[in-house]
Amino acid sequence: MSAENEPLEVWIDQDLCTGDGICVQYAREVFELDIDGLAYVKGADDELRTEPGAVVPVPAPLLVDVIDATRKCPGECIHMRRVSDGVEVFGPEAS
Ligand code: SF4
């Protein structure tokens, strides 16, 4: 099974976020800039997850958009990992 077909989750390392908002342009259902000017993930309840390392599931219909956001992120700080084993499949630590 390819990575694209497995449940994935996403988190942001705010220490590296530049606050440019590119991720929000790709997937505003998953990413949002908070009042501190940094991007955070949010879940299906639309609530920002502001605790460090907070993770939300990647909605299947938004998978391509979240992958694109991860690839374009200037801070290289969006991490997508497999739910099943926690391995990063898209992001700066993906092999
Ligand atoms: S694209 Fe990356 S650097 Fe830019 S706001 Fe989103 S998480 Fe931060």
Image (spheres, helix red, strand yellow):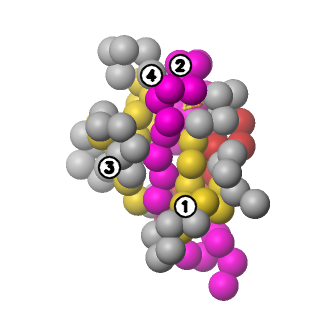
**Do the CB atoms of the residues marked 2 and 1 lie less than 8 Å apart?**
no
Q: Which residue is mark 2?
A: 19
Within the image, what quadrant is residue 59 found in? bottom left
Q: Residue furthest top?
A: 36
Residue at screen point 40% across, 34% down? 40
What residue type is disc 2 on?
Answer: Gly
Q: Earlier in the sequence, mark 3 or mark 4?
A: 4
Q: Name the quarter showing ligand 1.
A: top right
Residue at screen point 49% across, 39% down? 12
Is 12 placed above or below 2 here?
A: above
What residue type is disc 1 on?
Answer: Arg
**Mark 2 or 1: the one toward you:** 1
**Mark 2 or 3: the one toward you:** 2
84 left or right of 47? Answer: right
Q: Which residue is mark 1?
A: 81
Question: Bounds of the magenta span?
Answer: 1-29
Relative depth, front residue between 8 and 45: 8
Count residues near mark 2 (Cα–Cα under 10 Å), then give few for <14, some for 14-19, many for 20+: many
Q: Is mark 4 within 8 Å of ligand 1?
A: yes
Disc 2 to disc 1, C-alpha distance: 22 Å
Quarter placement of the C terminus: bottom right
Q: Earlier in the sequence, mark 4 or mark 1?
A: 4
Q: Is mark 2 within 8 Å of ligand 1?
A: yes
**Numbered label attached to residue 38:** 4
**Residue 43 image offset from top left, x and y in percent:** 32, 49
What residue type is disc 4 on?
Answer: Leu
Q: Which residue is mark 3?
A: 43
